[in-house]
């Protein structure tokens, strides 16, 4: 069974004033909420079970899914109303809601892309890696550092010069720089390790700290088209993008 988690709990501060009255997941692109676009893309890719974490205006997301009968899918909410747990803590809290035998595809609610999610999930299932992160060579400030086989070795912020877990990974000059897409897959073998972490933490910190002992793989898409609908000035760009990449799923 294909299963996914949609990160929809964020405050969406960069989308204010829209998010002063609604969660980021309910901000509309092409007359549909961001959540609709991600759910429909996952549905078209054959995903049957989805977990959506909620915090900011959580009741609006709950009402929206109920009014649409969960779009005929097995969708449940992971409620973070008491405290926003960040991405890693969000996954950790949701572990009891997952099928313990299947990988989990994780997708940010504000990401629109041309990725074949079914193909990405299948490739992740077949990989020896315990986690697969969708990456590309687009320009950004923060990069994942990979070896020649696309195994994750660390992370860097080229603006500040910060490197994690250690600058030693740059010494041989062989690492490659890839931008993370906000779409990744992790396998149930990581659940016990995740549960040993604190209640609240970023998932990238988890990957950085454990990439030396665990195999995390970057899956590169050379023709990746991606829009992070995280700011007001990207909404118009997202509207144009959706007019070209219109989903075929009906209302």
Image: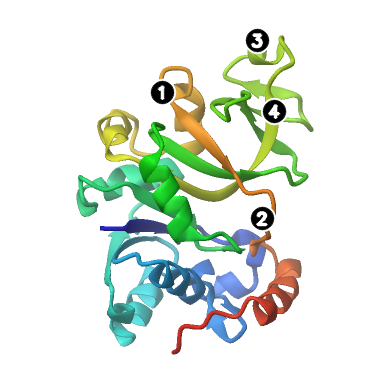
Helix, strand or loop status at disc 2: loop
Question: Residue 66: x and y, percent?
Answer: 29, 81
Judge whether 182 appears above or below 32 on screen.
above
Residue 202, can we see it? no
Q: SS for tag 3?
A: helix
Residue for badge 1: 214
Which residue position is annotated with label 2?
224
Query: How far apart are labels 2 and 4 at the CA level?
Result: 17 Å
- Quadrant occupied by the C terminus: bottom left
Q: Residue furthest bottom?
A: 251
Q: Earlier along the polypeptide chain: callout 2 or callout 1? A: 1
Disc 4 packing (10 Å; few <14; some 14–19; many ≥20): some
Dots 2 and 4: beta carbons under 8 Å? no
Give the x, y percent position of residue 55: 40, 61
* Real-space Cα separation, disc 2 to disc 1, in angstroms: 26 Å
- Sequence-wise first label, 2 or 3: 3
Q: Which mark is residue 238?
A: none
Q: Which residue is rendered at x = 36% and y = 67% of the image?
A: 46
Residue beneath disc 4: 176
Give 135 or 52, whichever is nearer the viewer. Answer: 135
Which of marks 3 and 4 precedes in the sequence? 3
For label 1, the crowd category at 10 Å Cα-Cα, with few meaning under 14, some 14 to 19 and many 20 or more, is some
Mark linked to residue 168: 3
Measure the alpha-carbon separation of dots 4 and 3.
Answer: 14 Å
* On-image quarter of the N terminus: bottom left
Image depth: mark 2 or mark 1 in front? 2
Residue shown at 41% from the left, 41% from the top: 88
Q: Are marks 4 and 3 in contact (CB under 8 Å)?
A: no
* Residue at screen point 56% across, 63% down: 110
Image marks 2 and 3: residues in contact by CB distance under 8 Å: no
């Amino acid at each position: 069974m294909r299963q996914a988690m949609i990160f929809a709990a964020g405050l969406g501060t960069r989308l204010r004033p829209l998010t002063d009255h609604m969660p980021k997941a309910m901000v509309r692109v092409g007359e549909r909420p961001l959540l609709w676009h991600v759910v429909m893309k996952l549905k078209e890719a054959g995903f049957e079970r989805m977990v959506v974490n909620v915090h900011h205006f959580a009741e609006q997301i709950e009402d929206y899914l109920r009014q649409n009968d969960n779009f005929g899918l097995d969708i449940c909410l992971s409620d973070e109303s008491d405290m926003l747990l960040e991405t890693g803590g969000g996954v950790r809290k949701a572990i009891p809601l997952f099928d313990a035998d299947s990988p989990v595809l994780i997708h940010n609610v504000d990401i629109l892309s041309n990725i074949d999610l079914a193909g990405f999930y299948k490739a992740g299932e077949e990989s020896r890696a315990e986690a697969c992160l969708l990456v590309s060579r687009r320009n950004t400030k923060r990069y994942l550092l990979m070896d020649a086989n696309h195994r994750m070795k660390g992370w860097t912020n080229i603006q500040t010069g910060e490197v994690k877990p250690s600058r030693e990974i740059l010494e041989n000059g062989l690492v490659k720089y890839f931008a993370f897409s906000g779409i990744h897959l992790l396998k149930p073998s990581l659940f016990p390790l995740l549960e040993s972490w604190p209640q609240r933490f970023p998932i990238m910190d988890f990957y950085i700290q454990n990439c030396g002992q665990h195999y995390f793989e970057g899956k590169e898409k050379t023709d990746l088209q991606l829009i992070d609908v995280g700011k007001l000035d990207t909404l118009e760009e997202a509207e144009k993008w959706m007019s070209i990449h219109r989903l075929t799923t009906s209302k």
